[in-house]
Image (tube, rainbow, N blue to C red):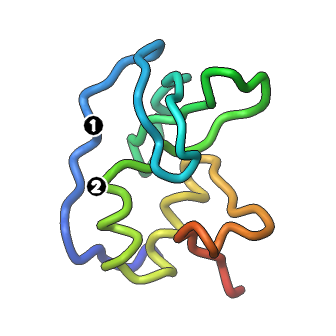
């Protein structure tokens, strides 16, 4: 069961193809889509990247990362198809402990 969140988070008003600044990647990114699932949060990839995409980390998501329970955030990220890679903790990512 999904732990309750402390606050409500409204997804940013962006569309596929919009250019945004990602705080995690520290660069401009292109919105690749907004998954339909437990979390309706934009996925992005770096403008010069040909690789995969990940959640857009903006000020709102940073606030959630800093205030919510790790279990709730990881469950939401897993529902959005996200994953925490090696070394993600240094940039404020949350790692599952199960």
Q: Which quadrant of the structure image shows residue 65? A: bottom left
Label 2, label 1: how far apart the Cα atoms are: 9 Å
Q: Is residue 79 left or right of residue 34?
A: right
Q: At 73% from the left edge and 26% from the top edge, which residue is drawn?
A: 49
Q: Residues within 10 Å of mark 1 (few under 14, many from 20)?
A: few
In the picture, the disc for residue 32 is none
Q: Looking at the image, do the residues carrying marks 2 and 1 touch, with CB atoms under 8 Å apart?
A: yes
Tag 1's secondary structure? loop
**In which quadrant of the rendered image does the C terminus lie?**
bottom right
Quarter of image, res 18: top left
Residue 82, percent across and down?
63, 52
Say above or below: 66 vs 47.
Answer: below
Query: Which residue is at a point 78% across and 22% down the rendered structure image?
Result: 50
The image position of residue 92, as x and y in percent, is 52, 71
69 relative to 46, above or below: below
In the displayed structure, 16 sits above or below 6; it is above
Callout 2: few (<14), some (14-19), or many (20+) C-alpha neighbours within 10 Å? few
**In this orientation, which residue lies closer to the viewer: 24 or 53?**
24
Left or right of 11, for residue 32: right
Q: Is residue 9 above or below residue 96?
A: above
95 left or right of 28? Answer: right
Residue 12 at what x, y percent from top left? 27, 37
Q: Secondary structure at mark 2?
A: helix
Q: Which mark is residue 12?
A: 1
Q: Earlier in the sequence, mark 2 or mark 1?
A: 1
Which residue position is annotated with label 2? 60
């Amino acid at each position: 069961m999904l732990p309750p969140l402390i606050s409500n988070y409204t997804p940013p008003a962006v569309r596929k193809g919009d250019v945004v600044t990602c705080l995690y990647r520290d660069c401009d990114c292109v919105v690749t889509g907004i998954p339909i699932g437990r979390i309706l949060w934009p996925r992005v990839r770096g403008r010069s990247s040909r690789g995969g995409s990940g959640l857009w980390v903006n000020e709102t998501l940073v606030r959630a990362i800093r205030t919510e329970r790790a279990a709730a955030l990881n469950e939401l990220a897993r529902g959005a198809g996200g994953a925490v890679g090696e070394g993600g903790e240094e940039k404020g990512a949350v790692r599952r402990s199960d």
